[in-house]
């Protein structure tokens, strides 16, 4: 049925496709988030879905399908009808899973998915529960040296926070145990509850916990401090420039969407992020707006699949 849909779309004349796109959406659009509620993927989807709903007059509905290293949620997008009414978000797991789950993915990332655009990026924070001993990154590394296998939590296999743990392992040689959760929301709840003493979490979803003294921020990934937490040193300042992963949140779609529908979706969901009011809202929650084109995002996905394949093989990352 999927192939018949693609063939029918290919046979439609350009004028018919353009007319269909101009009336799109004529019914609600589903945005599948492959994580539970409360994490950065969910936050980004809901902010941009709200704007698209207001702009189009049709509902853009966020549907959370967490677990399975984002595979079930991503598969739902890859196998959906290529009509624009089912799309999804994804993060860095999109480019790690082709290596991590090679031969096991129920879809081929570059064949079965289309790439609408990278929406935003954001660094990750190394966090400590208030009851933990460490007051700095150096303290965490000293504790890991004294207690090999020290646990650091993250938001799930392939999530940017997982990749930050991997980079920390490779950069320091410490025996650190990654502890994965079914998304950033459940991970943060567990970290606040003290289930694990330390973890990496997205700045966007953990900022409120830090400001409310429920968690302590020890370092931020990348070269620069964040103006939202100016007292927290960067990983470069802490002597670990290799820990530079940024969270990347973009929109994906089934392969084969007609170009006019792709343009309409981009105009509703991504292009508005560059406008002052929406940009300010996103930046206030620690996101840096990218809003890249479909072509640029597709090229980025191809490059990063190759890059993270090398990292995963070097680190020996395996699915949990």
Image (tube, helix red, strand yellow):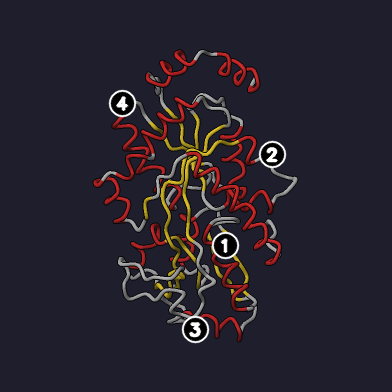
Q: Residues within 10 Å of mark 4 (few under 14, many from 20)?
A: few
Query: For the C terminus, which image quadrant?
Result: bottom right
How far apart are the alpha carbons under marks 4 and 2?
35 Å
Task: Compute the Cα span from label 2 to label 3.
Answer: 42 Å
* Residue 258 falls left or right of residue 98: left
Q: Residues within 10 Å of mark 2 (few under 14, many from 20)?
A: some
Q: State the image quarter where residue 158 is shown.
A: bottom right
* Residue denoted by label 3: 138
Residue closer to the observer: 184 or 204: 204
How many callouts does the rendering have?
4
- Name the residue beneath numbered marker 1: 163
Q: Which residue is mark 4?
A: 57
Q: CA distance from mark 1 to mark 4?
A: 38 Å
Give above or below for 293 relative to 132: above
Residue 318 in the image: x percent, y percent? 70, 59
* Numbered disc 3: secondary structure: helix
Circles 3 and 4 in contact, beta carbons < 8 Å: no
């Amino acid at each position: 049925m999927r192939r018949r849909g693609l063939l029918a779309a290919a046979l439609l004349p350009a004028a018919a496709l353009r007319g269909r796109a101009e009336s799109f959406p004529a019914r609600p659009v589903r945005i599948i988030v492959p994580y539970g509620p409360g994490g950065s993927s969910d936050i980004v989807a809901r902010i941009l879905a709200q704007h698209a709903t207001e702009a189009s007059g049709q509902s853009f509905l966020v549907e959370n399908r967490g677990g399975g290293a984002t595979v079930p949620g991503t598969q739902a997008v890859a196998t959906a009808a290529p009509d624009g009414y089912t799309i999804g978000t994804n993060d860095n797991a999109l480019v790690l899973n082709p290596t991590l789950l090679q031969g096991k993915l129920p879809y081929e990332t570059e064949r079965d998915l289309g790439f609408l655009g990278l929406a935003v990026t954001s660094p990750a924070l190394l966090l400590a529960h208030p009851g933990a001993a460490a007051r700095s990154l150096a303290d965490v590394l000293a504790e890991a040296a004294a207690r090999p296998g020290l646990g650091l939590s993250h938001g799930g296999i392939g999530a940017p926070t997982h990749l930050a743990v991997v980079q920390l392992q490779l950069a320091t040689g410490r025996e650190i145990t990654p502890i994965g959760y079914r998304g950033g929301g459940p991970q943060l709840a567990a970290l606040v509850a003290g289930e694990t003493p330390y973890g990496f979490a997205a700045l966007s979803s953990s900022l409120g916990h830090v400001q409310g003294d429920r968690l302590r921020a020890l370092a931020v990934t990348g070269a620069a401090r964040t103006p939202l937490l100016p007292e927290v040193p960067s990983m470069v300042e802490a002597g670990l420039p290799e820990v530079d992963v940024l969270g990347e949140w973009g929109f994906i779609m089934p392969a084969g969407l007609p170009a006019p529908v792709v343009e309409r979706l981009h105009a509703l969901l991504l292009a508005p992020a560059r406008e002052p009011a929406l940009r300010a809202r996103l930046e206030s929650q620690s996101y840096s707006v990218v809003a890249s084109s479909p072509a640029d995002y597709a090229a980025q996905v191809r490059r990063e699949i190759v890059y993270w394949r090398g990292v995963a093989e070097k680190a020996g990352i395996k699915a949990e």
